Image (cartoon, rainbow, N blue to C red):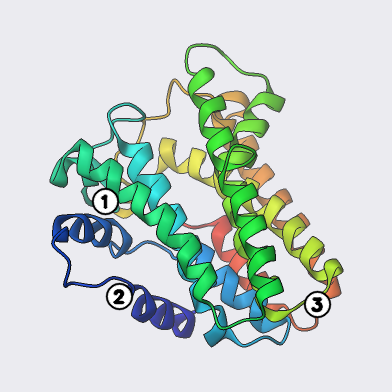
Amino acid sequence: MQNYLERIEAYLRGCFTDDQPQQVLFNSMRYSLLAGGKRLRPIFVLAFCDLCGGDTEAALPFGAAMEMVHTYSLIHDDLPCMDNDDYRRGKPTNHRVYGEATACLAGDALLTAAFGQLACAKLPSERIVQAVRVLSLCAGELGMVGGQILDMDAENRLCTAQEVYDIQSRKTGALISAACQLGVIAAGGSNAQQNAAAEYAEHLGLAFQIRDDILDVIGDRDKLGKATGVDENKNTFVRLYGVEKCGTMVAEETRRAIDALTCFDHPDFLIDTANRLISREN
């Protein structure tokens, strides 16, 4: 984990130039991109690449692309027109520091830069094309952005369990799926391995979101780096099932994620990562 994290951080710090007149844009992009976080998505890229026998150094641009898309989504999600949040990862949100317009443009720039990262990877062109397709599907209208619009549409009514799943599998699960699949793609893995990675991500993403819902109720604000209780009136799994039942669901979805790894040799790191996420506090 530490090895992956150090390499990801070093790569992200070298992604942007400092010799352009639009320096405030780069400052805003870096403010959120380098603000810490678990780096879960790029870690999954490198871990699945390793698992499939690939070159993780060549996969770093794929990992950076995932973190850029994730960061852009957080910047936009925090904007007044969306969730209107004041803190993210223990720091003022981007728009509180740079203003709404610059924050919006920083998110736009990170999304665009992500596909530039995919294009510059030192990997066979067919793998890059495949990665572009997977990330665009998972991040766009059929994935994360689609989940966000469903979430906004459901703000003033109580959703069914299927509707909550539809929202969260797109908002949270889709990018985790993209990350796991991009790791396999970077390594030139098989279709069976890519499908297994997607299945792992589907269940782990659901477990991750349910745990997030639990932490919004029982979590420590200082450990989370953001306010708690903000989802009290939103359509969450905790609102549907309660904290105790959701704890059982997290364990069950984690088990299903681990079961999806049977086609891989020695998936110990990914199993350990899944188990750690069950009891995470941030």
In the rendered image, residue 235, in percent from the top left (x then y), is placed at 54, 24
Callout 2–callout 3 Cβ contact below 8 Å = no
In the rendered image, residue 261, in percent from the top left (x then y), is placed at 79, 69
Q: CA distance from mark 2 to mark 1?
A: 26 Å
| Circle 2 residues within 10 Å: few <14, some 14–19, many ≥20 | few
Question: Residue at (21%, 36%) from the top-left corner?
Answer: 100
15 w.r.t. 144: above or below: below
Quick one: label 3 or label 1, which is nearer the N terminus?
1
Callout 2–callout 1 Cβ contact below 8 Å = no
Residue type at the position of mark 2 = Arg
In the rendered image, residue 101, in percent from the top left (x then y), is placed at 22, 38
Label 2: which residue?
Answer: 13
Quarter of the image for residue 29 reads bottom left
Quarter of the image for residue 244 reads top right
Mark 3 or 1, which is nearer the eye? 3
Label 1: which residue?
Answer: 222
In the rendered image, residue 79, in percent from the top left (x then y), is placed at 30, 34
Label 3: which residue?
Answer: 264
